[in-house]
């Protein structure tokens, strides 16, 4: 075998293939060795154990094995044994264990408050999608004199779509050998620029490679003692749907970082085909215990979520650091509002806060919305007031997933501590005193807002985007799925009519008034598509 490998490594000029024939289950005894049933075999017989011991010359007696065949003893020759000494010496000569988790790492100074100002300011008169709001925040975080060097942006594809081509000339794309080609975009101001000192990781259209890079960077605090904060930005559903197993492995390795699902939502990318119609990624993400999923509507929400995430991963007082934050951001431009005074920051971080109290008196309803659907909810609030004299409070739900986790945790605490005072779930606390039926809406499947149903005492209805839908305008898609502005209005009127708080004919009149059954009559959203 040695001679074969030596000849193969020294042979030049042609590829060399070595076929190494092995025996499956080698050394495990006649019931295992070389048998196709190896994977179905669950345990060794006592006779197999003894033969295995003899084959490997392990100094364990028959008496020890016969004492309990289900718990054979482990054998270690001791740290002073020549075999152990040799292995440890060779490992040390090679630079230590790989990978090796270190309990301490270099100090990391979290960003200064001014680095988050861009998120708080809003976009003024300029329209900007939440993707751009996030990218602007990321740019300022990377400029932070102490913290910026720790960020590792990872973009497998569509950097220009996300507005991240602005990073190319300054942060540059990492390539240990530098740029060895003439880029086709060289005449552009924001052309590709590769460098051994590059900060961006750009693995091409390679999601598996991108998550591998994310995992390597997100565990560097332990494997190299140098904290890095990977920010993996992917397109639509090309994250958890394509590489969910890799994110599970990342969680198993205690990876820390940010996962950004850009151009998110089921109706925002109509016209590009079903491979972009993401209505389910938050549900896929919910299966990973290490992932905190957020669906923010505005830039200032993103700022507080990112700050909270960094403090949780690397703050001095954090006790649960090994987490990944998944933020869904959109490509639909809106006027990004400035952060309101007296913002309920705790509500933003924990998952829900009152965004816009009702402006009139009248039959009361509550609208819960997340992400890109928040502007629709605000428009529904106006339509309910103007056309039906109905009073609606609008709540921004930044995380359906985290509200559910908190509710389930409260239930388990009560389950394991009978007779003790029970903790009220956060969403229940927030909605205390919020009267009337609730309409919950998002650009995801109804199952996403349905996650909190059991923790809401009010009558509760969900609107979402279930099914494949079709490729057309945003407004038509939202009308088709019945999660647009006027669908929120009609659903609220239906519940109020059942309670006798509005005219019984109001829902039918509203369906006719807004042509709810006509997909081409939809008006929700705009046609803009830049980041």
Image (tube, rainbow, N blue to C red):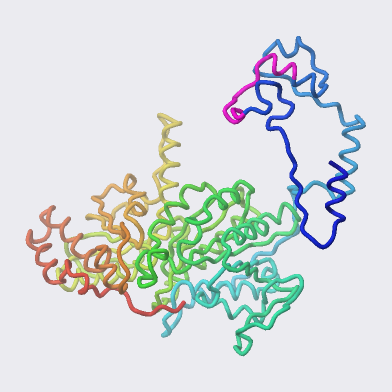
- Quadrant of the drawing holding the N terminus: top right
Residue 151 picture quarter = bottom right
Q: How many marks?
A: 0
Q: Is residue 518 left or right of residue 214?
A: left
The residue at 34%/46% (across/down) is 455
Percent across and percent down for residue 486 are 22, 68
Percent across and percent down for residue 238 are 49, 61
Percent across and percent down for residue 199 are 68, 71
The residue at 40%/46% (across/down) is 425
Residue range in magenta is 36-51
Residue 146 picture quarter = bottom right
User: Farthest residue in the front direction?
Assistant: 14
Q: Is residue 516 left or right of residue 155?
A: left
In the rendered view, would you say 201 is above or below 128? Answer: above
Q: Nearer the viewer, residue 11 or 257?
A: 11
The residue at 7%/59% (across/down) is 504
Q: Is residue 218 magenta?
A: no
Q: Would residue 315 be visible to someone looking at this image?
A: no
């Amino acid at each position: 075998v040695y001679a074969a490998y030596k000849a193969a490594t020294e042979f030049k000029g042609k590829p060399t293939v070595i076929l190494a024939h092995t025996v499956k289950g080698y050394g495990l005894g006649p019931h295992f060795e070389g048998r196709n049933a190896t994977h179905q075999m669950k345990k060794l017989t006592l006779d197999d154990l003894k033969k295995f011991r003899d084959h490997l010359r392990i100094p364990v007696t028959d008496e020890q094995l016969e004492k309990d065949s289900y718990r054979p003893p482990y054998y270690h020759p001791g740290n002073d044994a020549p075999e152990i000494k040799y292995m440890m010496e060779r490992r040390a000569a090679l630079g230590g264990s790989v990978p090796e988790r270190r309990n301490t790492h270099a100090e990391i100074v979290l960003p200064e408050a001014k680095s988050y100002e861009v998120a708080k300011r809003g976009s003024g008169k300029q329209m900007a999608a939440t993707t751009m709001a996030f990218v602007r925040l990321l740019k300022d975080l990377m400029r932070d004199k102490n913290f910026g060097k720790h960020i590792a942006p990872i973009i497998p594809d569509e950097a220009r779509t996300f507005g991240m081509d602005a990073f190319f000339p300054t942060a540059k794309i990492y390539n240990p050998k530098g740029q060895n080609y003439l880029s086709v975009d060289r005449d552009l101001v924001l052309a590709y620029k590769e460098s051994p000192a590059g900060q961006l990781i750009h693995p091409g259209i390679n999601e598996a490679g991108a998550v591998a890079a994310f995992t390597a960077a997100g565990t560097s605090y332990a494997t190299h003692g140098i904290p890095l904060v990977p920010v993996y930005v992917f397109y639509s559903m090309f994250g958890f749907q394509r590489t969910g197993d890799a994110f599970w492995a990342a969680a198993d390795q205690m990876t820390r970082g940010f996962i950004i699902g850009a151009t998110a939502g089921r109706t925002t990318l109509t016209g590009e085909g079903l491979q972009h119609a993401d209505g389910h990624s938050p549900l896929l993400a919910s299966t990973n215990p290490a992932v905190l999923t957020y669906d923010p509507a505005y830039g200032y929400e993103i700022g507080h979520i990112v700050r909270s995430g960094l403090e949780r991963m690397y703050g001095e007082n954090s006790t649960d650091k090994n987490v990944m934050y998944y933020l869904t951001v959109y490509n639909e431009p809106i006027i990004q509002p400035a952060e309101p005074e007296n913002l309920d920051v705790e509500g933003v971080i924990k998952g829900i806060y009152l965004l816009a109290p009702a402006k009139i008196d009248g039959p009361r309803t509550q609208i819960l919305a997340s992400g890109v659907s928040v502007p629709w909810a605000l428009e529904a609030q106006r339509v309910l007031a103007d056309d039906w004299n109905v009073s609606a409070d609008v709540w921004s739900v930044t995380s359906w997933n985290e509200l559910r986790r908190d509710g389930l945790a409260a239930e388990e605490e009560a389950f394991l501590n009978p007779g003790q005072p029970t903790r009220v779930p956060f969403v229940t606390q927030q909605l205390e005193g919020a009267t009337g039926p609730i309409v919950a809406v998002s650009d995801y499947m109804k199952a996403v807002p349905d996650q909190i149903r059991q923790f809401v005492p009010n009558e509760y209805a969900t609107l979402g985007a279930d099914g494949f839908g079709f490729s057309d305008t945003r407004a038509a898609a939202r009308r088709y799925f019945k999660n647009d502005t006027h669908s929120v209005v009609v659903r609220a009127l239906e519940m109020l009519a059942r309670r006798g708080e509005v005219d019984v004919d109001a829902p039918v009149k509203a369906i006719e008034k807004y042509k709810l059954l006509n997909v081409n009559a939809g008006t929700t959203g705009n046609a803009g598509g830049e980041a």
